[in-house]
Image: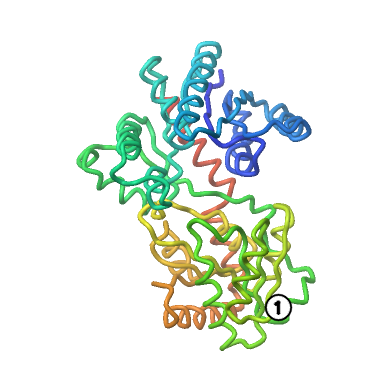
Amino acid sequence: MKKKILYISYDGMLEPLGQSQVLSYQERLGKKFEIHILSFEKSFDEPSKNQVMRRFNDAGLYWHPLKYHKSPAILSTVADITYGLFKSFFIVRSYKVDMIHARSYVPAVIALSLKKIFGIKFIFDMRGFWVDERVDGNIWKKNSYIYKISKWFESKFLLNADHIISLTYAAIREIKKFPYLIGRPISISVIPTCTDLNQFKLKKAKINDLKKNFVLGYVGSIGTWYNFDAVIKAFKELRILEPNAKLLVVNQNEHKLISSMIRKAGISSEFFKLTKATHSEVPQLIQTMTAGIFFIEPLFSKKASAPTKLGEFLGCGVPCISNRGVGDMTNILEGENVGVAVSDFENQSLNHGIFQLINLSKDPDISLRCSNVAKKYFSLEKGVADLQKIYIQLAAS
């Protein structure tokens, strides 16, 4: 008989993130386990809902969507937890669930409550240091009650989870320093943000004319944790060494701001291209790039981050330049010789990093090496296999 798993996600299955980082994993595990997914949906677009429901049905998964409440901030989260707890209680009782997989902190409140009530196994898939992200993002104050209460909950999750999943080894090193965990054995493993390498892959066919020159590529938003000013500074350093270099930016909703920032830096429009793309169009655009670039502020919470775009760049055979102090990126980029991690965003560091990146891009084996490193660290199949192993081990214990 299949073991029964309740997966609780605060990300909706109608969102791209929920589909790529939850559904893509679970639909591959549906033949081995009876999986129920409880998600919080921000909208219920009927065509999208029908399309996602077909994926659930094809994979033999069970979907239990709830409405996500956005405001007022704290009360809406309390409401979601309350509704989620009642719904989860019903699912656990009705389907005789064996374990609960909680994706991030809000679902973990529900999962921990059900563990206390029913004694079932609890997986805390922490996805990063969410509480510290709220402080680093200037949303909460470190001396606020909400921060202290959330850190208290975090300690309960880590102490009571039957297994913990982290995105990075850097986060595990930090977790083991938490005073209440020192000397205590914990069951923990790393599953980074994985990538569908059937989409993000090497392509030898003829590509865009941009490839004639060095094309530095940026994919995604420029706000919150990302330092786009440093990207512009790095591109200016690149043009000193490669005068015909181009900057290709793939972004959905910030074109006016991006254009303003680039022009303000004195970069002519002939040297940059700004475009939109659907998720399925992104791989083809990355394949036109000589190298990828993104810089993330090296805050404490970012030790637990595994940026999706790193796996996407490498999967397409594109080396990257980024920065130290973020997850396991330095070990991957420099340890595997597929990129450069600068120590800071000063001109001297950026110049040295760009010089290294240019030399690396001329390595005839670089594309294949990047692709192989993506398979080693970010393959969706590997992530699914690692998750399956955790489920089997917990089911047998």
Q: Mark 1 sits on what residue?
A: 269
Question: Which kind of residue does numbered mark 1 sit on?
Answer: Ser
In what element is the residue under mark 1? helix
> Residue 188: percent from the left, percent from the top?
37, 40
> Residue 63: percent from the left, percent from the top?
63, 25
How many numbered circles does the render carry? 1
| Colour scheme shown | rainbow
Classify residue 70 by image quadrant. Answer: top right
Relative to 58, residue 135 above or below: below
Residue at (70% x, 68% y) in the render? 274
Residue at (69% x, 59% y) in the render? 283
Residue at (50% x, 56% y) in the render? 224
* Position of residue 302 in the picture relative to residue 264 (left or right): left
The local crowd at label 1, few if under 14, some if 14 to 19, many if 20 or more residues have their Cα within 10 Å, is few
* Position of residue 67 in the picture relative to residue 163 (left or right): right
Relative to 125, residue 326 above or below: below
Relative to 337, residue 306 above or below: above
Q: Residue furthest top?
A: 94
* Position of residue 318 in the picture relative to residue 394 (left or right): right
> Residue 52: percent from the left, percent from the top?
71, 33
> Residue 205: percent from the left, percent from the top?
78, 68
Q: The C terminus appears in which quarter of the rendering? A: top left
Q: Nearer the viewer, residue 318 or 89?
A: 89
